[in-house]
């Protein structure tokens, strides 16, 4: 997509929308112990596929910034800088890196298998950083740490399938003349 004032405004609006959706997703959670399964990751995934690396990282970075400033945007309506040091800190940092990587892999490509690869890579990044941070904070056995991980794999598998399906439908609607709609 070429960079014009209108296209930049359009992308700012989409980026802001995904920030808002990520916030809403944080309120939709399943408690699983110290780290809940949240719908936020779904919007990180979908945003990465639709916005591309630049706007996906802006959207996700804004979400993180709002939460760190104390606004109640994290799971359970929480916010504050201390969350970066809490059990979810690795996951929160992983969101930003995952959005960027998903955007890089899927940008200007409308291939389902590329979208799946992008989202699997993004999911891996989020969970790798999250698990390593949990392991650092709560030095328990690796077995227990990986048991926690499998709960997230099931939820993420569903989120990935739905995000890829929606991206296939939404891309032509929001990018009618760009390379993102080519097959």
Image (cartoon, rainbow, N blue to C red):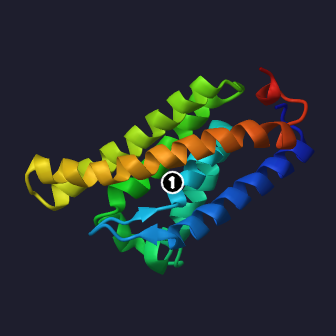
Q: What residue is shown at x 66% (from left), y 40% (from top)?
A: 165
Q: What residue is shown at x 91% (from left), y 46% (from top)?
A: 6
Q: Position of residue 136 (x, y in %)?
A: 17, 54
Please state which of residues 37 and 55 is positioned toward the viewer in this rendering.
37
Direction from residue 50 to residue 128 in the image, left or right = left
For residue 2, above or below residue 47 = above
Please state which of residues 78 and 119 is positioned toward the viewer in this rendering.
119
- The C terminus, quarter of image: top right
Please state which of residues 113 and 105 is positioned toward the viewer in this rendering.
113
For residue 120, above or below residue 81 = above
Q: Position of residue 58 (x, y in %)?
A: 63, 51
Q: Which residue is mark 1?
A: 41
Residue 84, quarter of picture = bottom left
For residue 41, above or below residue 33 = above
Direction from residue 64 to residue 133 in the image, left or right = left
Q: What residue is shown at x 34% (from left), y 62% (from top)?
A: 88
Q: What residue is shown at x 37% (from left), y 46% (from top)?
A: 153
Q: Position of residue 17 (x, y in %)?
A: 72, 60
Secondary element at image label 1: helix
Res 78 visible: no
Residue 170, quarter of picture = top right
Q: Position of residue 52 (x, y in %)?
A: 67, 37
Category of crowding for the residue at label 1, using alpha-carbon neighbours closer than 10 angstroms: few (below 14), some (14–19), many (at least 20): many
Direction from residue 128 to residue 94 in the image, left or right = right
Res 54 visible: yes
């Amino acid at each position: 997509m070429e960079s014009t004032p209108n296209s930049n405004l359009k992308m700012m609006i989409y980026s802001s929308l995904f920030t808002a959706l990520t916030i809403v997703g944080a309120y939709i959670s399943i408690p699983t112990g110290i780290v809940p399964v949240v719908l936020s990751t779904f919007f990180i995934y979908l945003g990465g596929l639709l916005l591309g690396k630049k706007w996906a990282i802006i959207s996700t970075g804004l979400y993180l910034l709002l939460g760190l400033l104390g606004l109640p945007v994290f799971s359970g309506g929480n916010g504050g800088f201390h969350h970066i040091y809490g059990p979810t800190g690795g996951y929160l940092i992983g969101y930003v890196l995952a959005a960027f990587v998903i955007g890089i892999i899927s940008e200007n490509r409308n291939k389902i298998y590329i979208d799946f690869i992008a989202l699997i890579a993004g999911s891996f990044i989020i969970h790798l950083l999250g698990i390593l941070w949990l392991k650092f904070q709560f030095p328990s056995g690796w077995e227990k740490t990986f048991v926690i991980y499998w709960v997230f794999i099931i939820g993420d598998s569903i989120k990935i399938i739905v995000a890829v399906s929606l991206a296939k439908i939404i891309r032509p609607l929001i990018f009618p003349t760009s390379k993102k709609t080519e097959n």
